[in-house]
Amino acid sequence: MYRKAREAEGARRRKLADDLKKRDQSSAPAKKPHTWLSRVIQPALAVLLLGLAAEGQAGLSGPALVGSVTIVQIANSTDATFMFAGQCRGNTANFSTTLSSFDVSGVTAANLEGLSLPGQGPAQCLSGGENLTVVTVVTPQFMNQNGVVNAGHVVILYVVP
């Protein structure tokens, strides 16, 4: 009789301990998925953008340069300065060039696509000095105000010789 009572009491305590353990696990704060997400989602997004950019673009190839572009009209000139800040193959690949006879005032996201950048390929991607073409400009992150174009997300590809 005492043995059965002890076994029943032990079973009840084990069940109570299991219930407390389950409750502690369910109320535990979630682990931060940010690190994992940044390692998985960002490269996947870059590949997706590269695929969208290359779709129907004959003569263009990777690696893709992904980043932001600022174009500023040079005062009292018909030229503009094109500045790219971004990455290629996980490396910083910033560059700047002068666009001759370029009027910033009428530039839209759509007509920025297809812009040729001869000899501007940064060494962080390939050997350096290759010809580039802007292939994708994300419209919601594009703004043209007062002689300055800001494109928050742009994909640039290499022109295949």
Image (tube, helix red, strand yellow):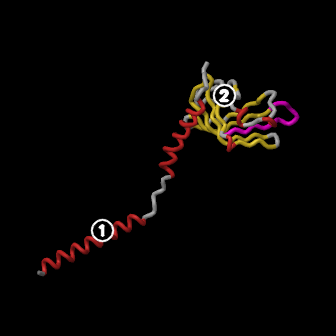
Distance (Cα) linking label 2 and label 1: 62 Å
Name the outermost residue toward the bottom.
2
Q: Which residue is mark 2?
A: 133
- Say what secondary structure mark 1 lies in: helix
Q: Residue 126 got which mark? A: none
For the N terminus, the quadrant is bottom left
Identify the residue at the far left of this view. 1
Q: Which residues are magenta?
A: 68-79
- Say the numbered circle drawn on residue 18: 1
Marked residue nearer the N-terminal end (2 or 1): 1
Identity of the amino acid at label 1?
Answer: Asp
Q: Position of 40 compared to 91: left or right? A: left
Image quadrant holding the C terminus, namely top right
| Residue 127 in sight from this viewpoint | no
Question: Looking at the picture, which amino acid does disc 2 mark?
Answer: Thr
Of residues 129 and 31, the one nearer the viewer is 31
Q: Is residue 16 left or right of residue 54?
A: left
Residue situated in front as seen by the camera: 19 or 95: 19
Seen at 57% across and 28% down, the residue is 62
Q: Is residue 118 above or below residue 147?
A: above
The quadrant holding residue 87 is top right
Looking at the rendered structure, the secondary structure element under dot 2 is: strand
Q: Is residue 76 magenta?
A: yes
